[in-house]
Image (tube, grey):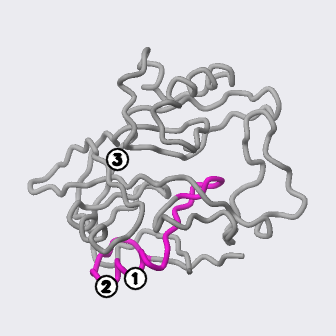
Amino acid sequence: MRYFTPQEDRSAGYTGFVDAAPKWGLPGIRNCPACKATWSGGVSYPSVDLTPVAALANFEKARAEPIEEYERLRELVRPLLPPGALLEPGTTFGPSVGKAQGRFGPFVLNYLWVLMVQREALEKLQAEGLRGLKGCRTELRFRQRNAPELLELELFPVGRLHPDCLPPGHEPPCPRCGRLRVQRPDDFLLDARTLPGDLDLFQLADYSVIICTERFVDACQRLGLDGIAFHPVPIA
């Protein structure tokens, strides 16, 4: 199986732009007692509804908190997530809320880790039997008539980069907060042992990189679904 990472492609003349953020989120960590870092990650679960959680206001403003407060809030939302879901500082939940305008193609790559798709395109891909494609509603205000229905694809975090593409002798993750202490490399190499066998679209668990299989690429090209281009990623 070959793997690819999607990147924005405006060669077809699409001008669509989305300015939105998830409705809820965990705080980042401020001044980890072990590594002293202030940080947050890029995992998102747009299908997860936090309204059953008490003190919902604690999840409505992006900010950094001491690690003990982050851990307290993390445990409040954990029962609402599927088994094995990754919860890291800054994890977000719920629909993207904001504004959108312009001419949209089948896909919209909003930032590097948010992939949106028009409903008709998603239904065509699902009819092809692709695995793990979950479209979630958005709350976008369009500045135009005949606005498209954009859904956010929920990208489950799984799979990792191979150690060979990381700098030699790099520091291990922080033992207290889990922060990776090495920057994402420019040239990716996927660790074949960690890749899922039941998903055609997912996000790496260690870095905010969207990965898709050649099955996904072949279906998009056969159906004429554009808006993103695909770049191969080697595996080892």
Q: Quadrant of the N terminus?
A: bottom right
The amino acid sitting under disc 3 is: Asp
Mark 3 or 1, nearer chain start: 3
Q: Quadrant of the C terminus?
A: bottom right
What residue is disc 2 on? 222
The extreme bottom residue here reads 222
The answer to whether marks 2 and 3 mark residues whose Cβ atoms lie closer than 8 Å is: no
Q: Find the magenta span and give its range.
A: 203-229
Q: CA distance from mark 2 to mark 1?
A: 6 Å
What residue is disc 3 on? 19
Please tell me whether mark 3 or mark 1 is closer to you in this view: 1
Q: Secondary structure at mark 1?
A: helix
Image quadrant assignment for residue 75 = top right
Of residues 1 and 228, the one drawn nearer to the viewer in this rendering? 1
Q: How many other residues sit within 10 Å of disc 3, few (<14), some (14-19) or many (≥20)?
A: some
Q: Position of residue 201 (x, y in %)?
A: 46, 64
> In this rendering, would 110 be left or right of 122?
right
The extreme left residue here reads 145
The amino acid sitting under disc 1 is: Asp
Q: Residue at x 24, y 65 (%)?
A: 123
Q: CA distance from mark 3 to mark 1?
A: 30 Å
Q: Residue at x 81, y 35 (%)?
A: 35
Please check the rendered image and state whether residue 21 is part of the magenta-colored stretch, yes or no: no
Q: Position of residue 88 (x, y in %)?
A: 61, 38
Q: Secondary structure at mark 3?
A: strand
How many numbered marks does the figure carry?
A: 3
Q: How many other residues sit within 10 Å of disc 1, few (<14), some (14-19) or many (≥20)?
A: few
Q: How many other residues sit within 10 Å of disc 2, few (<14), some (14-19) or many (≥20)?
A: few
What residue is disc 1 on? 218
Q: Position of residue 2 (x, y in %)?
A: 56, 80
The answer to whether marks 2 and 1 mark residues whose Cβ atoms lie closer than 8 Å is: yes
